[in-house]
Image: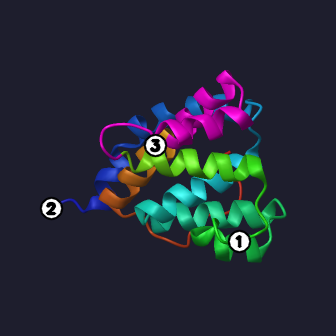
């Protein structure tokens, strides 16, 4: 009987279909630091250990501080996130944890103050993409701790 990781390895051709989304987002005006921060936060919400390992390493390699990483789960109470980051995190959380079938208007309005129309669409794509990766990794349990910075760039 095949293990979950065997199935994941056999399914790499399907996972590779997601790579162009990452390439597109890398060229967006959102910037890699913000995208990685959003990826890390969404991975916290979903409990994806593989993605948390990956994005924490990428963030640290890019100069992110330990303090901001350690407090990201409580970012609302921490003073060291920009208004743009706060809007992105609020949006990412709302899109990840859709309640009552919608995103509240106040969350949308906050995001629109910080992001252009194109950026908000790109941010939404980023959130849905990391949610997809989270669910694949949670389902098939790749080994955690093996990621090397830039491995999937």
Which quarter of the figure is the C terminus placed in? top right
Most extreme residue toward the right is 63
Q: In the structure shown, which secondary structural element does the residue marked by tag 2 occupy?
A: loop
Q: Can residue 32 be seen in this view?
A: yes
The residue beneath circle 2 is 1
Alpha-carbon distance for marks 1 and 2?
A: 48 Å
Asked if residue 121 lies left or right of residue 14, the reply is: right
Percent coordinates x, y for residue 6 in the rendering: 31, 57
Percent coordinates x, y for residue 126 in the rendering: 57, 39
The residue beneath circle 3 is 95
Name the magenta segment's main secondary structure.
helix
Q: Give the range drawn in magenta.
A: 99-127
Percent coordinates x, y for residue 108 in the rendering: 56, 35
Q: How crowded is mark 2: few (under 14 residues within 10 Å), some or many (20 or more)?
A: few
Q: How crowded is mark 1: few (under 14 residues within 10 Å), some or many (20 or more)?
A: few
**Disc number for residue 78:** 1
Evaluate if marks 3 and 1 touch, with contact meaning CB atoms under 8 Å apart.
Answer: no
Alpha-carbon distance for marks 3 and 1?
A: 22 Å
Which quarter of the figure is the N terminus placed in? bottom left
Q: In the structure shown, which secondary structural element does the residue marked by tag 3 occupy?
A: helix
**Disc number for residue 3:** none
50 or 113: which is nearer to us?
113
Q: Closer to us: mark 3 or mark 2?
A: 3
Q: Is residue 151 visible?
A: no
Asked if residue 55 lies left or right of residue 101, the reply is: right
Q: Is residue 143 above or below residue 12?
A: below
Residue pictured at 54% horizontal, 40% vertical:
106
Residue pictured at 58% horizontal, 27% vertical:
121
Whichever of callouts 3 and 1 sits on the residue coming sooner in the sequence is 1
9 or 18: which is nearer to us?
18
């Amino acid at each position: 009987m095949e293990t979950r990781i065997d199935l994941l390895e056999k399914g790499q051709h399907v996972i590779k279909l997601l790579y162009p989304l990452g390439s597109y987002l890398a060229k967006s005006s959102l910037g890699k630091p913000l995208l990685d921060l959003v990826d890390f936060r969404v991975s916290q919400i979903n409990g994806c250990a593989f993605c948390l390992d990956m994005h924490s390493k990428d963030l640290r390699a890019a100069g992110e501080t330990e303090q901001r990483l350690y407090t990201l789960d409580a970012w609302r109470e921490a003073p060291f996130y920009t208004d743009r980051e706060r809007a992105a995190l609020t949006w990412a959380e709302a899109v990840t944890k859709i309640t009552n079938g919608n995103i509240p208007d106040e969350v949308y309005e906050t995001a629109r103050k910080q992001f252009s129309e194109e950026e908000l669409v790109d941010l939404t794509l980023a959130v849905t993409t990391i949610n997809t990766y989270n669910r694949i990794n949670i389902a098939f349990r790749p080994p955690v701790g093996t990621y090397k910075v830039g491995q999937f760039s």
